[in-house]
Amino acid sequence: MEYKFIKGIINALGCQNVLKVDFSPKKTCNFDCIYCIVGRTTKWTMKRTEFYPVEEVFSEISNYIDHNGTVEYVLLTGSGEPALYSGFGELSEKIRINFPNIGIIAYTNGTLLNRKDVQKEFANCNVLGCNLNSVYDEEFKRICRPLKDVRLQDTLNGLKEFSKHFKGILKFDTKFVKDLNDTERNVLGLIDYLKEVQPNNYTVISKKYKGQELTEEFTSFITETMKDLPFPVELYL
């Protein structure tokens, strides 16, 4: 069978044997991050839309599992921000009920988690990765290039509220890019914020942009400042 939504088996967020499912038209997002491997955003939106019928997406998932053996996890993603798919909750619930031994993974920029309905839907995840590149508007806008309707403070508040009730594994990551969000105040601000959220894991990644890399001075500052945080930290600098 030729699949439209199934993108194969990958490793994701520290998990192996993960079935990747993509249910968004490329690239549908409310960010246009400098470093995004999917490419430039072509479909800008903050409106949740059922891009494809839930039954159609679930049918492919079910067919793949039936014919290729059980997978450990299903990654519900999109070519952009997965929370923009209005069928996320229904799809994740179908997977949870029909395949109770398979975990659900998602990776989000968190911009819609200030909504109660989105919080409820993403609570179905066993593992949730959240990208957070800044807690300050200036740095945030430079690296993420968000839609004008995105409010960073709403995102921060929503993620913090969600973290209080989420029963799965919560992972955060930050991508640092030279001259965009590589400020000492941003590092310290992120640390203060994450101490309140208390993720299960935090990953810091250096991203090269236009041939420019982070300075040794800045990477040393990160290494020193983050060495004693009260949650596991992985540095890829």
Image (tube, rainbow, N blue to C red):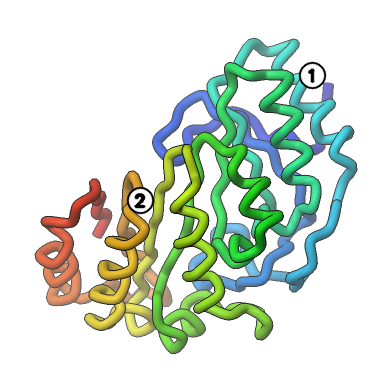
Q: x%, y% of residue 163?
A: 45, 53
Neighbours of disc 1 within 10 Å: few (<14), some (14-19), many (20+): few
The residue pinned by badge 2 equals 199
Q: As drawn, is 76 to the left or to the right of 165? A: right
Q: Residue at x 53, y 32 (%)?
A: 10
* Image position of 69 (left or right of 49): left
| Residue at screen point 46% across, 85% down | 137
Q: Amino acid at mark 2?
A: Pro
Q: At which x and y percent is residue 74? A: 61, 31
Q: Amino acid at mark 1?
A: Asn
Please tell me which residue is depicted at 52% across the width and 78% down the height of the picture.
152
Q: Give the labeled residue for mark 1.
A: 63
Q: Earlier in the sequence, mark 1 or mark 2?
A: 1
> Does 72 sit above or below residue 183?
above
Q: Is residue 181 left or right of residue 148?
A: left
Mark 1 or mark 2, which is nearer to you?
Answer: 2
- 231 sits to left or right of 50: left
Residue in the foreground of this view, choosing between 131 and 212: 131
Give the quarter of the image for residue 53: top right
